[in-house]
């Protein structure tokens, strides 16, 4: 069965280019020219991946992502020419999985799509095969981490984690005081080679600190080793 992609893009030239190239690569494409049309299309079918532009009329890309995430864990790949928009979409809990900066090459786009779908299908397969583990809750003073439910309780307030934030945090706390370079983090969490793009990692680390640290500007758990990487200290 062909993998089905929902493409939400208001630029006709880009949409036609992607439609032609991805169809040639063996994907099935459904296209929408604005966010409103994209949400209607998403409600009608099941997709293997959503490819969405951030700057669109009627309903913008970030709102599209937010609404999709209320009901689905489908991989979402965003396109944007503005780093600030990418930062928001990846960091403010909207739930995007990855991004491609405009202008992009089809080689990069295809690679990102393949990686996102592969990660999603591998994770789903592992979930089906593995037995449900016992609840795993770790405590550090007023900080309690529940990996089974993607939550953190800090000072009795429950805070939701994204899947990626939970993966990063679990890697840190199970390896206290071990220093991870950005390349290592990318390899462990995204399961692919690091291309030197620091933005994705920086955004996730910053948002994770904002959720677990009492003072994110002076973290006591997720420490930065300048020029090297990050490590977890129990505090």
Image: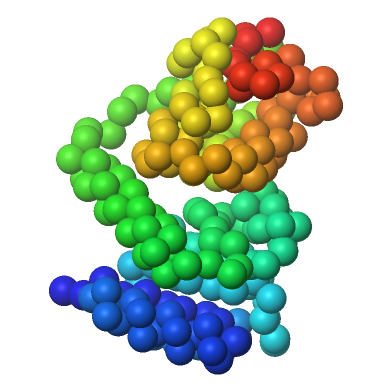
Residue 159's spot in the image, x, y percent? 66, 38
Looking at the image, which residue is at 30% across and 53% down? 118
Residue 69's spot in the image, x, y percent? 53, 62
Whether residue 209 is situated above or below residue 201 in the rendered picture = above
27 vs 66, nearest the viewer: 27
Total residue callouts:
0
223 vs 124, nearest the viewer: 223
Whether residue 123 is situated above or below residue 108 in the rendered picture = above
Quadrant where the image shows the N terminus: bottom left
Looking at the image, which residue is at 27% across and 74% down? 25
Whether residue 161 is situated above or below residue 57 in the rendered picture = above
Instruction: Classify residue 215 as left or right of residue 87.
Output: right
Quadrant where the image shows the C terminus: top right
Quadrant for residue 47, please give it. Answer: bottom left
Quadrant for residue 213, please give it. Answer: top right
196 vs 149, nearest the viewer: 196
Instruction: Classify residue 75 as left or right of residue 1.
Output: right
Residue 105's spot in the image, x, y percent? 47, 67
188 vs 159, nearest the viewer: 188
Quadrant for residue 94, please give it. Answer: bottom right
Q: Is residue 22 visible?
A: yes
Instruction: Classify residue 188 as left or right of residue 173.
Output: left
Give the colouring mode of the picture.
rainbow
Looking at the image, which residue is at 66% across and 38% down? 202
Residue 111's spot in the image, x, y percent? 37, 58
Instruction: Classify residue 70 as left or right of residue 111.
Output: right
Q: Is residue 67 visible?
A: no
């Amino acid at each position: 069965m062909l993998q089905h992609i929902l493409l939400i893009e208001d630029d006709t030239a880009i949409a036609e280019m992607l439609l032609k190239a991805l169809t040639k690569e063996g994907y099935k494409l459904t296209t929408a020219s604005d966010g409103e049309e994209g949400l209607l299309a998403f409600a009608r079918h099941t997709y293997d991946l959503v490819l969405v532009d951030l700057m669109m009329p009627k309903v913008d890309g970030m709102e599209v992502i937010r609404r999709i995430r209320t009901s689905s864990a489908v991989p979402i790949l965003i396109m944007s020419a503005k780093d600030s928009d990418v930062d928001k979409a990846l960091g403010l809990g909207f739930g995007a999985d990855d991004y491609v900066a405009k202008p992009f090459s089809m080689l990069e786009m295809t690679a990102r799509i393949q990686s996102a779908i592969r990660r999603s299908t591998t994770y789903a397969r592992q979930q089906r095969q593995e037995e449900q583990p016992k609840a795993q809750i770790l405590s550090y003073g007023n900080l309690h981490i529940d990996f089974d439910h993607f939550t953190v309780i800090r000072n009795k307030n429950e805070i939701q984690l994204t899947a990626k934030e939970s993966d990063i945090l679990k890697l840190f706390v199970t390896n206290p005081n071990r220093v991870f370079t950005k390349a290592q983090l990318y390899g462990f969490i995204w399961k692919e080679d690091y291309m030197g793009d620091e933005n994705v990692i920086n955004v996730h680390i910053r948002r994770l600190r904002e959720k677990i640290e009492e003072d994110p500007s002076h973290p006591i758990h997720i420490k930065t080793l300048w020029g090297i990487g990050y490590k977890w200290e129990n505090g």
